[in-house]
C-alpha cells in the first residue's frame, strides 16, 4: 500500500487549552497535571482520576459537569456523550465543524490522556473470575483513545505514562505539540488498543475452549532492532517480551540469527531442566553436541567431543550455574554466546575479558505451559500447538524380544529428548549420557543415519553399545540394520509404519531392544 502525502491535514503545532484525563494507571499523573495547570489548561476528569488531581491541590472539572449527566451503572457510563466525543472528534480547522460546535455549545478538547483498565493483569491473577474479567473490559477508554488518535491533526493522545516526560518537555518549551509528535502518539495509541483487544479475544477463545481460534490475533511490541536480518540486505526487528526469558548482560547487541539460535537452545534445554548437569552446543539452530554428567565441565567435554569442528563460533547453553572450571575449558575456542541460569564471579572475571562474546542469563524457558507456535507463509501463517510432552517410559512400549537394560533406558530417554530438537529426518546416536553422532535435515532417514555414523567415526567415537533415536518411524528395515551394523544395541522411535513388523524382526535378528513411543517429533 502506497500512502498519499498528508498535506491535506493541518500540520501546525497544536496549542492546548482543554485536556481530558481519565487513567487507571496513575503513574506520573500529578506531574503531568501540574504542567498543564501551570500553563492555564482546563482539566476535565472522571471518578478516581479527578479525586487524585484534587488531592494534589489542582482544580479539575468532573466530566458530569461537562455532559450535564451523572456517571451511572457503577461507572460503566461516564464519557460516552456528545459533549465529550464532539469535543474530541471535531476538526477545528474545518469551519463547518467549528460552527456546529458553537451551535451545540460544545468546547473542543485538544489533549486526551487515557489508559485502560488493567485487563491483562486481572486475567493473569489466579483468583480471576469471568465476571471480574468482564468488569475490566474498558469501553469508554478505548473509544476516547481511538477518537483522539483518529483526529490527531487536531488532538493529542497520551495512552501510556511512558509518553508523559517527552510530552511535558515539548509542551514546556513550545507551549504546543508538533504534528509529528501527535502523529507518533496516534500510532502508539492504535497499537495500544489493538493489543488490548487481542488480549480480550484471547480470553474469550479460552472461555470457548478453542486451542486454535477462528481468528489468529498477534500483537507484539518491538523490543529491539538488530542491524539486519539473516543477511545484511534484510531489515529486521525483534518483537515480544524476550526480557522475561533472557538477560544479555555482556557483549555485543544480539543479532537476528542469535535470537534464532537461542530460541532453539532454550527449547532443548527446557527438556533438561531437572536432569544432571547438562550442556548443549548449537550451530545454525541445530545441536551439534549434547551431554549430561556429574559436573558441568565433564558434560561440556562430552558434548564437545561429539563434534570438535562445528562448535567454533557457536553457542553453548547449560542447565546449571557456569563455574570457573567449565568456563576455562569452554574459553579454549571461540564461542559467540553462552547461556546459563547464572555465572559465578570467578567465571565472569574470565569470560568478560572478551568484550564481544555475549553472556546471557536464562530467566525462564519458553513454552513451559504449552501455547502456540506460528510461522509466516505465503498469504498468512501456519499455527500449531507446541510440541510438549512428559518423557515417561511407562507410556512407551518395548516391541522386541529383548528388553532394554536400565543403562539403555537412560540413554534412550536422553536421545529421545534430543532428537525432538533436531531437524528431520533426525537420527541421534548416544551412550552414557552423550551424543555420539547426529544426522539432521536429510531427505532420507538412511542418509541421516549414515551421516550420524560417519560423524562419530570422524571423531574417533565408538558406537558399540550405543542407542539410536529416530524422530519418526523407520519406513524400512534398512535403517535399523545400519544402526546394528554400527554397533547400536537399542532403538527408540514412534512406530506406526505399515512395515513395523518387518522393522521389529530386523531388530530381533540383531538382538536389539526397540521401544515405540507412539509420539512423533518431526521438525520440518
Image: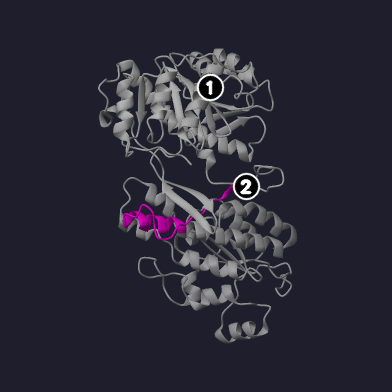
* Residue shown at 60% from the left, 14% from the top: 328
Q: Nearer the viewer, residue 329 or 118?
A: 329
Instruction: Using the image, determine if residue 373 lies above or below residue 457.
Output: below
Q: Nearer the viewer, residue 38 or 92?
A: 92
* Residue shown at 41% from the left, 29% from the top: 478
> x, y percentage for residue 276?
41, 19
* Residue shown at 55% from the left, 56% from the top: 378
Q: Give the residue number, with chain letter if any, for mark 2.
A: 237
Q: Is residue 449 magenta?
A: no
> x, y percentage for residue 342?
52, 24
Q: Of helix, strand and loop, which one carries label 1?
A: helix
> x, y percentage for residue 146?
54, 67
Q: Which mark is residue 59?
A: none
Q: Which residues are magenta?
A: 198-223
Q: Which mark is residue 454?
A: 1
Q: Of helix, strand and loop, which one carries label 2?
A: loop
Q: Nearer the viewer, residue 355 or 385?
A: 385
**Disc 1 or disc 2, which is closer to the eye?**
1
- Asked if one can make out residue 131 in the rendered structure from this viewpoint, the answer is yes
Q: Is residue 199 magenta?
A: yes
Instruction: Using the image, determine if residue 308 lies above or below residue 57.
Output: above
Question: CA gap, disc 1 to disc 2?
Answer: 39 Å
Q: Nearer the viewer, residue 156 or 233?
A: 233
Tag count in the figure?
2
Instruction: Using the image, determine if residue 253 lies above or below residue 316.
Output: below
Amino acid at each position: 500500500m502506497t500512502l498519499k502525502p498528508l498535506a491535506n491535514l493541518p500540520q501546525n503545532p497544536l496549542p492546548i487549552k482543554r485536556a481530558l484525563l481519565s487513567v487507571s494507571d496513575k503513574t506520573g499523573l500529578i506531574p503531568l497535571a501540574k504542567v498543564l495547570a501551570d500553563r492555564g489548561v482546563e482539566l476535565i476528569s472522571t471518578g478516581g482520576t479527578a479525586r487524585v488531581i484534587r488531592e494534589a491541590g489542582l482544580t479539575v472539572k468532573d466530566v458530569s459537569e461537562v455532559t450535564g449527566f451523572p456517571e451511572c451503572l457503577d461507572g460503566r457510563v461516564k464519557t460516552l456523550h456528545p459533549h465529550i466525543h464532539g469535543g474530541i472528534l471535531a476538526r477545528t480547522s474545518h469551519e463547518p465543524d467549528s460552527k456546529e460546535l458553537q451551535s451545540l455549545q460544545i468546547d473542543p478538547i485538544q489533549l486526551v490522556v487515557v489508559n485502560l483498565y488493567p485487563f491483562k493483569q486481572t486475567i493473569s491473577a489466579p483468583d480471576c473470575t469471568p465476571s471480574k474479567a468482564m468488569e475490566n473490559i474498558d469501553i469508554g477508554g478505548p473509544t476516547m483513545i481511538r477518537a483522539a488518535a483518529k483526529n490527531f491533526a487536531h488532538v493529542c493522545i497520551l495512552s501510556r505514562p511512558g509518553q508523559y516526560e517527552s510530552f511535558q518537555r515539548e509542551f514546556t518549551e513550545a507551549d504546543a505539540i508538533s504534528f509529528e509528535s501527535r502523529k507518533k502518539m496516534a500510532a502508539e495509541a492504535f497499537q495500544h488498543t489493538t493489543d488490548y483487544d487481542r488480549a480480550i479475544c484471547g480470553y474469550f477463545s479460552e472461555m470457548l475452549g478453542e486451542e486454535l481460534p477462528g481468528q489468529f490475533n498477534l500483537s507484539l511490541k518491538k523490543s529491539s532492532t538488530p542491524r539486519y536480518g539473516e543477511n545484511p540486505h534484510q531489515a529486521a526487528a525483534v518483537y515480544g517480551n524476550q526480557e522475561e526469558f533472557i538477560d544479555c548482560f555482556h557483549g555485543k547487541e544480539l543479532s537476528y540469527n542469535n535470537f534464532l539460535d537461542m530460541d532453539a537452545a532454550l527449547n532443548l534445554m527446557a527438556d533438561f531442566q531437572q536432569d544432571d548437569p547438562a550442556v548443549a552446543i548449537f550451530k545454525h539452530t541445530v545441536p551439534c553436541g549434547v551431554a549430561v554428567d556429574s559436573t558441568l565441565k565433564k558434560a561440556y567435554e562430552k558434548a564437545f567431543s561429539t563434534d570438535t569442528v562445528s562448535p567454533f563460533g557457536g553457542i553453548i547453553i547449560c542447565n546449571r550455574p557456569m563455574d570457573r572450571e567449565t568456563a576455562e575449558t569452554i574459553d579454549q575456542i571461540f564461542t559467540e554466546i553462552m547461556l546459563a541460569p547464572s555465572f559465578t564471579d570467578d567465571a565472569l572475571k574470565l569470560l568478560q575479558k572478551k568484550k564481544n562474546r555475549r553472556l546471557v542469563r536464562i530467566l525462564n524457558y519458553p513454552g513451559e505451559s504449552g501455547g502456540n507456535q506460528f510461522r509466516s507463509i505465503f498469504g498468512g501463517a501456519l499455527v500449531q500447538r507446541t510440541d510438549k510432552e512428559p518423557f515417561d517410559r511407562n507410556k512407551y512400549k518395548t516391541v522386541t524380544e529383548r528388553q532394554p537394560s536400565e543403562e539403555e533406558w537412560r540413554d534412550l530417554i536422553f536421545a529421545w529428548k534430543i532428537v525432538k530438537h533436531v531437524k528431520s529426518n533426525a537420527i541421534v546416536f548416544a551412550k552414557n549420557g552423550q551424543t555420539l553422532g547426529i544426522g539432521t535435515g536429510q531427505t532420507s532417514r538412511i542418509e541421516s543415519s549414515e551421516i550420524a555414523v560417519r560423524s562419530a567415526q570422524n571423531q574417533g567415537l565408538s558406537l558399540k553399545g550405543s542407542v539410536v533415536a529416530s524422530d519418526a518411524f523407520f519406513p524400512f528395515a534398512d535403517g535399523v540394520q545400519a544402526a546394528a551394523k554400527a554397533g547400536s544395541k537399542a532403538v527408540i522411535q514412534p512406530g506406526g509404519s505399515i512395515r513395523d513388523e518387518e522393522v521389529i524382526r530386523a531388530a530381533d535378528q540383531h538382538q536389539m531392544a526397540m521401544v515405540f513411543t507412539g509420539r512423533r517429533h518431526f521438525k520440518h
